Image: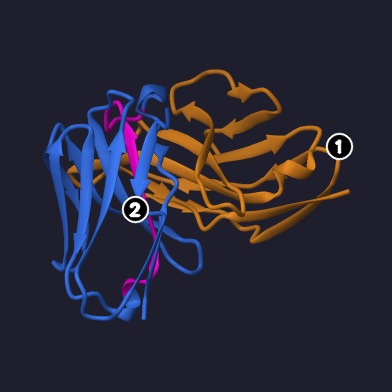
């Protein structure tokens, strides 16, 4: 009964391909996020959805497109993959987007994307 | 803009000793939340402890405690009685309002190694 799950865990693909990463949470949370962790372990938010609505859209190439079919799922689709997209991508969820303890974000196991 | 600073890229501690991981933050929002996460070599992000900006007492969770000094804008993590399994990367993070939305901003992390 994993709280936040992501598939796949590893993704190796050629430059120029299109790929998707799926995320699901069974915590009943309203808010979901995508983060990118680069090779230096720095974590940066990419997108945030609250009840299927986009609320945070950081400066990310428009090759990256999040899709939230329902509030338990937030998928990340990446078009025309580039070498620089190689990173670990984390999905997270929280009850809300505020500053309280109930807004703690819980992370999925991460997806290591390698673009060759 | 909000900012989190972790000045210790790497730390070593002897097993069973206590260790303090430093974190300073900067935000103009009077309402914020501070979080610590652990990332072991297996890669997952594990939530450890939360401190709210209006909390009067320092947070504690088992062997983890947060030394919150609001005037100095510091939120150091103290791990007591270190165990070999504590060896990991530790991230300090903050949620506060940055622009139109609240988002979680991470520090650069501290790699802790516990020595037997």
The chain letter for the residue carrying disc 1 is: B
Q: Which residue is mark 1?
A: B16
The chain letter for the residue carrying disc 2 is: A
Is the C-beta separation of discs 1 and 2 under 8 Å? no
**Quadrant in the picture for residue B7:** bottom right
Residue under the image location 40 percent in, 43 percent down:
A108
Label annotation for residue B47: none
Left or right of A52 in this view: A39: right
Q: Which residue is mark 2?
A: A35
Left or right of B67 in this view: A32: left
Judging by colour alone, the chain drawn in blue in this rendered image is A
Which residue occupies the foreground of this view, B61 or A73? Answer: A73
Provide the secondary structure element on which disc 2 rests: strand
Q: Which residues are magenta?
A: A85-99
Asked if the stretch drawn in magenta spans residue A73, the answer is no
Which residue occupies the foreground of this view, B39 or A14? Answer: A14
Residue under the image location 69 percent in, 36 percent down:
B78
> Which color is chain B depicted in?
orange
Residue B69 image point, x, y percent: 58, 33
In this view, A69 is above or below B54: below
Residue A100 image point, x, y percent: 37, 24
Which residue occupies the foreground of this view, A1 or B89? Answer: A1
Residue under the image location 15 percent in, 42 percent down:
A68
Residue under the image location 35 percent in, 46 percent down:
A6
Q: Mark 1 and mark 2: span between their CA atoms?
A: 34 Å
């Amino acid at each position: 009964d994993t709280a936040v799950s992501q598939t796949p865990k590893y993704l190796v693909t050629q430059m120029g391909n299109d790929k998707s990463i799926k995320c699901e949470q069974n915590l009943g949370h309203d808010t979901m996020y995508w983060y990118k962790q680069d090779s230096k372990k720095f974590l940066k938010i990419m997108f945030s959805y609250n009840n299927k609505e986009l609320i945070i859209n950081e400066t990310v190439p428009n090759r990256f497109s999040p899709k939230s079919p329902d509030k338990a799922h937030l998928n990340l689709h990446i078009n025309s993959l580039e070498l620089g997209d190689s990173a670990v991508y984390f999905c997270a969820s929280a009850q809300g987007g505020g500053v309280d303890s109930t807004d703690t974000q819980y992370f999925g196991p991460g997806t290591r994307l390698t673009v060759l | 803009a909000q900012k989190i600073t972790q000045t210790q890229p790497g730390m070593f501690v002897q097993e069973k000793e206590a260790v303090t991981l430093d974190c300073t933050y900067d935000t103009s929002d009077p309402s914020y939340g501070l979080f610590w996460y652990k990332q072991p070599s297996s890669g997952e992000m594990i939530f450890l402890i939360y401190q709210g900006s209006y909390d009067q007492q320092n947070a504690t969770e088992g062997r983890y405690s947060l030394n919150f000094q609001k005037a100095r804008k510091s939120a150091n993590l103290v791990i007591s009685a270190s165990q070999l399994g504590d060896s990991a990367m530790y991230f300090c993070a903050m949620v506060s309002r940055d622009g139109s939305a609240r988002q979680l901003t991470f520090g650069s992390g501290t790699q802790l190694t516990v020595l037997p």
